Image (spheres, grey):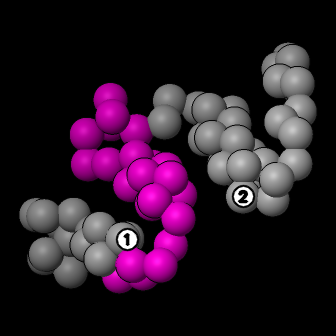
């Protein structure tokens, strides 16, 4: 617990080396210690996750959805 408080979580790519590097980057950004480095909205996080899923599945990227 103290390690996480002072150093942050262990990088995901170290825990799961076979995981997609883009996904590791998204998770790392979501867990960033500095609030300014984190996603500023769920929409931005969702857009990055959708982009990764689309690339991995070979689908075409959908048009961005309009937010209310």
Regarding residue 46, the answer to whether it shows in the image is: no
Earlier sequence position, callout 2 versus callout 1: 1
| Looking at the image, residue 16 lies above or below residue 61 | below
Answer with left or right where residue 48 lies relative to residue 19.
right
Q: Residues within 10 Å of mark 1 (few under 14, many from 20)?
A: some
Tell me which residue sits at (36%, 71%) in the image: 13
Tell me if residue 21 is in the magenta stretch.
Answer: yes
| Looking at the image, residue 9 lies above or below residue 57 | below
Q: Nearer the viewer, residue 32 or 5?
A: 32
Tell me which residue sits at (30%, 77%) in the image: 14
Tell me if residue 31 is in the magenta stretch.
Answer: yes
Q: Nearer the viewer, residue 35 or 64?
A: 64
Q: Residues within 10 Å of mark 2 (few under 14, many from 20)?
A: few
Q: Which SS class for mark 1?
A: helix
Question: Which stretch appears magenta?
Answer: 15-38
Residue tagged 1: 12
Q: Position of residue 38 (x, y in %)?
A: 40, 39
Q: Which mark is residue 56?
A: 2
Q: Nearer the viewer, mark 2 or mark 1?
A: 2
Q: Which SS class for mark 2?
A: helix
């Amino acid at each position: 617990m103290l390690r996480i408080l002072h150093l942050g979580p262990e990088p995901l790519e170290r825990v799961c080396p076979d995981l997609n590097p883009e996904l590791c980057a998204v998770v790392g950004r979501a867990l960033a210690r500095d609030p300014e480095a984190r996603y500023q909205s769920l929409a931005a996080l969702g857009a990055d996750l959708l982009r990764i899923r689309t690339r991995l599945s070979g689908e075409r990227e959908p048009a961005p959805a309009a937010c209310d």
